[in-house]
Image (spheres, grey):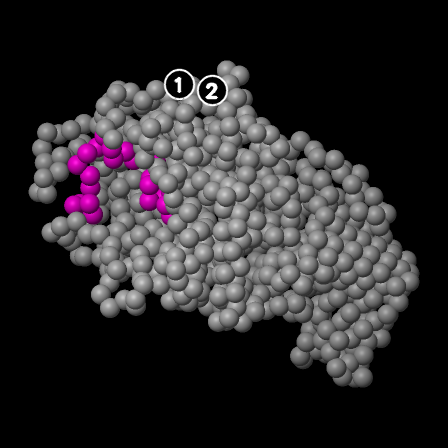
Amino acid sequence: MNVSRRTLLRASAAGAVGLVAAPAAASGAASGAGLVVASFVDDYKTNVTANLTAETNAAVRILSGMQRVWTTGTAWNTGSARDEQFLRANIRYCVKTTTHRSAEAAARAFIVDRQHQSYSVIAGLGPLADLYKAGALAVTGITTAPASTPATTISDAVPAGAPAGSTLGAGNPASELGKVVTLVNTLRGSWSSGNPSKFAYQYPRPWRLTAGSEVTDTGTVDEFGYPVYESATIVAPQLLRQRSTNPAEDGGFVSGHTNALFLAALAFAYAVPERFQEMVTTAYDLAETRIIAGMHSPADVIGGRILGTALAAAILSDAANATLKADARAQALRFFQERVGGDVHTFAHSTNISSDAYASRATNASIVRPKQTYGLPARRSSGARMVVPKGAEVLLETRLPYLDAQQRREVLRTTALDAGNPLLDGPEAWGRLDLFTAADGYGAFDQTVAVTMDATAGGFSATDTWRNNITGRGGLLKHGTGTLTLAGANRYRGGTAVAQGTLVAATPSALGTGPVVLNGGTLRLATPTVHTAGTFHHDTGTLALSLGPHGATLAAQSTTPAAQSATLAAQSATLAAQSATPAAQSATPAAQSATPAAQSATPAAQSATPGAAPGARDAAHEAHSSAHVAHGAALVVRGEAVLGAHSVLEIAVTPSVKLDKPFPILEARRIRGRFAKVVVTTPGYRADLFQDTDSISVRLRPA
């Protein structure tokens, strides 16, 4: 399709701000002119090349933050920069990246360019990837890159000798993993093209642009017969013949590869949530190769991510796909369990970075964080409260299956990226969703969060870890038989109550700063010292910990190896800072109650803070706390501790523990009551309890 005249994008930059989706209960939103438009998830099938305006195409509409920085021209080469600072930074990034690109990076960019995107992202499955490829009959003919420019264009094809039925991309729909393949293909279906947005915005590729985002044709051609434009962006040599000769239909914004990579990755993340965070990382990582290749700019890639994320949510939310998505998840789980055993999550994280490029969460965070905005200039944030786009919660449906839809929306809201980036702030704010961070649970408790986990359901319903640094005035109430680990530098103030199942405190400040109530189930201490600024009420249930040669240890007994590894990984203050919620909310004072009842808090308006500040502040807070209590009791309570008539202390003993040495268990301003029972779970030991008005310790002896 040749778009030779100016595309009419009537919604002004100011109007685009008003096109914000309503909460899930609403069906649409009003623009600044009072026009009611459908939410993207209800209108995504308008994304066809016949519709090229924000009013007629839902994809063009949600991407209209681009209007704040770019004015579309009457032809592909007559547009102009509206925000020169933003677009100069955009092109400067391309020039710097392609100028300093290594030969290895160029070769990788070629492979990602030429491979089917649905195949490329399979790498994110890590130890499960080869099993998936075999079961789905997924293959590629692009595994290496030429050293220089090939004589002809190169396309992916089924390699000679591949098993019968082998198929490019996600695989064969008739294979053992056919439902998963079909889910991937459905997300990448008829309504998922980036071309309508390319035609609408007509922002050229960086190799056609000057530093000021202008098109200047030098009037010459290169050795391959392509027009030469005034540009400092260098296309990877292997891809020089892959360039298009029709610039009117070859816009840069949005990156089609990026859109496809995110669509495929999020389909796999839904079907195989055991690798959810790794699949999100893979999409970010591979999308950057579009910039490394010289084919796209950061703005193009961000636009592709926004579009792919919104389309994935819309298609997964579509009632017509309800059975397919459920079948795909069930099929993937059954397939992998038959091959690796019941605990797919543990196997999926059983190798190191030498054989799984996405094995390290800290490395993954370092991959994702810079690519969320690429450091492009942001405007001053209005501080407006994030409104999660309608239907976005479906993206976390299998990753956080024990939360309801509204809770998943709250996870997305409290982990959202800061406002201020003109592209991310587009209508419905799809660009502000941070799925990497959302995979680690809440970023803030703005009211009491009640979590019910069912161990019999298996998977994340049985055991999960929240690694974010949780703030807010609300608290946590743990129900159900499952195990939840808190592994962040937490500062939420509304209190923590355990009624059922197991809550694991894996960092010194895991339990926040409010009162802690143990009224059933188990509170397990999985770090040398856990502290709380509030009170501690232990009415019933079990306080559990492990003792080693130097006191309480990190080696608390988690319910699964996966939970153990998550607990150990959470000890790093650096990792805690990296997992900080970019849009962490500032907290307002809340009165603390010392009663064992769950804290009830009304939502409070939160003011957004700069993304780096909460993480740095929380890391410092955690480091100070760790140093302060490193040699203290297993549980340090600033207020009063009350032990009820049915309270149980459970102790596991690690090797080389010293006998006849007192181990401090509990310190508080004052202790009322006594543990009703002390249980040593390790055979061959018993424990004698010693109690003072403000401390309790135990001495281990042979049984």
The residue at 22%/43% (across/down) is: 235
Q: Tell me the quarter of the image containing the C terminus.
A: bottom right
- Please rate how many residues cluster around mark 1, counting C-alpha atoms within 10 Å: few if below 14, some from 14 to 19, many from 20: few
User: Residue 226: percent from the left, percent from the top?
Assistant: 13, 38
The residue that mark 2 highlights is 15
The residue at 64%/52% (across/down) is: 402
User: Residue 674: percent from the left, percent from the top?
Assistant: 89, 64
- Please rate how many residues cluster around mark 2, counting C-alpha atoms within 10 Å: few if below 14, some from 14 to 19, many from 20: some
Q: Residue furthest top?
A: 33
Mark 1 and mark 2 in contact? Answer it, CB < 8 Å: yes
User: Residue 158: percent from the left, percent from the top?
Assistant: 26, 60
User: Residue 274: percent from the left, percent from the top?
Assistant: 52, 59
Q: Tell me the quarter of the image containing the N terminus.
A: top left
**Of residues 399 and 239, which is closer to you in this image?**
399
Residue stretch in magenta: 239-261
Q: Is residue 201 above or below residue 349?
A: above
The residue that mark 1 highlights is 10
Q: Is residue 248 magenta?
A: yes
Q: Indicate which label's residue lies in the foreground, 1 or 2.
A: 1
Q: Is residue 633 magenta?
A: no
Residue type pointed to by label 2: Gly
**Helix, strand or loop status at disc 2:** helix
**Of residues 150 and 56, which is closer to you in this image?**
56
Res 500 → quadrant: bottom right
The residue at 27%/66% (across/down) is: 162
Distance of label 1 from label 2 (alpha carbons): 9 Å
Does residue 571 appear in this view? no
Q: Is residue 688 above or below residue 73?
A: below
